Image (cartoon, helix red, strand yellow):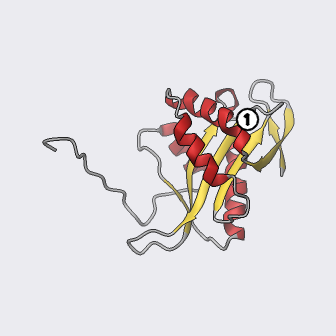
Amino acid sequence: MTAALPDPNTGHVESLAVRDLRSDDLDEVVRIDALHTGREKRDYWSATLRRFVDRTNRKQVGLAVEETEGRLAGYLLGEVRAFEFGSEACGWVFAVGVEPDRLRGHVASRLLREACRRFRTAGIETVRTMVRRNDVPVLSFFRTAGFEGGTFVQLERNLEEGA
């Protein structure tokens, strides 16, 4: 799938393809993630990508937008999950990463649209994600894309000594 996307620096519209994520995208995914998190998590991403490059599994979505010569503008990972507590099967987006100089260039929007299309094709009616409540740019992105508070509330407990 190809989408016309404006270059955030020049405004020039360019055509970037959304494609399936491949195992040889590992270095680019690690690089983009590290630019946002400050940590290189090669082992995590290596294990995760191994699960998501199997194109026969329609319950998993691994997508990339490629700029030039193998350099990624962004990636998205999601899957169909059914959880306990009465949750029906739904699509979960659990990773979206965009090259920092491509933020606000519609890369993440294009990836999300394609992921939602694939979830619908798999018979899914709802897509969920989880975002840190203080991550305003990511919250804004998902809200702009039509996401809102869902029917479940995430709870957690700190297990450090004395807690």
Q: Quadrant of residue 119?
A: bottom right
Estimate the x, y position of residue 35 in percent, counting from the top left: 57, 27
Q: Is residue 106 visible?
A: no
**Looking at the image, residue 83 lies above or below residue 1:** below
**Looking at the image, residue 157 lies above or below residue 100:** below
Give the residue at mark 1: 72
159 sits to left or right of 20: left
Q: Quadrant of residue 118?
A: bottom right
Q: Quadrant of the C terminus?
A: top left
**Could you tell me which secondary element the residue under label 1 belongs to?**
strand
Q: Residue at x 68, y 26 (%)?
A: 101
Q: Residue at x 68, y 47 (%)?
A: 109
Estimate the x, y position of residue 80 in percent, counting from the top left: 58, 65
Estimate the x, y position of residue 15 in percent, counting from the top left: 86, 40
**Looking at the image, residue 152 lies above or below residue 67:** below
Q: Quadrant of residue 161?
A: top left
The amino acid type, in three-letter code, at marker 1 is Leu
Question: Residue at the top extreme?
Answer: 9
Image mark count: 1
Q: Residue at x 55, y 29 (%)?
A: 34
Q: Residue at x 66, y 31 (%)?
A: 99
**Looking at the image, residue 99 lies above or below residue 149:** above
Q: Is residue 31 visible?
A: yes
How many other residues sit within 10 Å of disc 1, few (<14), some (14-19) or many (≥20)? many
